[in-house]
Image (cartoon, rainbow, N blue to C red):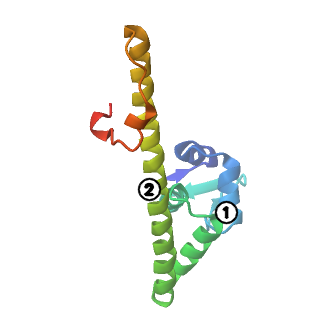
Amino acid sequence: MATYTIREVAQRFHVQTSTLRYYEDQGLLCNVERDDAGRRVYTDAHIGRLKAIACFKHAGMSIDELRRFFAYEKDERAHIADMLELLESRHQAILEQRAALEEAYMHVLRKLHLYRDIQRSIETGGPHPDWANYDGKDFRADDR
């Protein structure tokens, strides 16, 4: 069985060692053994749990939501509806974030095209572009 030190795990997941201790304190990482010197010893099971934590955190789950999810997971049969509700709620939040990000992306892309054209008009002495010709236009096909 492969084992890992707290430093190795922290480096692997790009977190501070204090984050791993916090996850333990919050009940997200369980059964972390200690060696004879009292140092934490992590296993592949902990690595798997940390992958799930990292994924869910990246998806915007709070520590409380993570704690509830992993508690529900211990007894799926009794908590399947709770798990689905939590995941569906997170799914909806991600869809909303994705839509907001897409809107922001399109605005930045329009501004990028506008200011490239302004730069070109300055260099060539051509007419100054008007934002009205860019607002609402879809530049994704031109995305570079």
Residue at the image position 72 percent from the left and 52 percent from the top: 37
Q: Is residue 57 left or right of residue 98?
A: right
Q: Dot 2: what SS?
A: helix
The vertical placement of 70 against 37, above or below, is: below
As shown in the figure, which amino acid type bears the numbered disc 1?
Glu
Residue 86 in the image: state x and y as whole percent: 52, 75
Q: Please count the marks in the image.
A: 2
Q: Dot 1: what SS?
A: helix
Residue at the image position 29 percent from the left and 33 percent from the top: 142
Quadrant of image for the C terminus: top left
The vertical placement of 131 against 82, above or below, is: above
The first of marks 2 and 1 along the sequence is 1
As shown in the figure, which amino acid type bears the numbered disc 2?
Ala
The vertical placement of 76 against 56, above or below, is: below
Q: Nearer the viewer, mark 2 or mark 1?
A: 2
Residue at the image position 52 percent from the left and 83 percent from the top: 82
| Mark 1 Cα shell of 10 Å, populated few (<14), some (14-19), many (≥20) | some
Residue 35 in view here: no
Q: Nearer the viewer, residue 131 or 8?
A: 131
Q: Nearer the viewer, residue 13 or 138?
A: 138
Residue 138 in the image: state x and y as whole percent: 33, 42
Q: Nearer the viewer, residue 19 or 43?
A: 19
The reply to whether the C-beta atoms of the residues labelled 2 and 1 are less than 8 Å apart is: no
Task: Name the mark on residue 65.
Answer: none
Distance CA(mark 2)–CA(mark 1) = 34 Å
Residue 1 in the image: state x and y as whole percent: 46, 57
Residue 116 in the image: state x and y as whole percent: 41, 22
| Mark 2 Cα shell of 10 Å, populated few (<14), some (14-19), many (≥20) | few
Q: What residue would you read off at disc 2?
A: 99
Q: Is residue 51 left or right of residue 30?
A: left
Q: What residue would you read off at disc 1?
A: 24
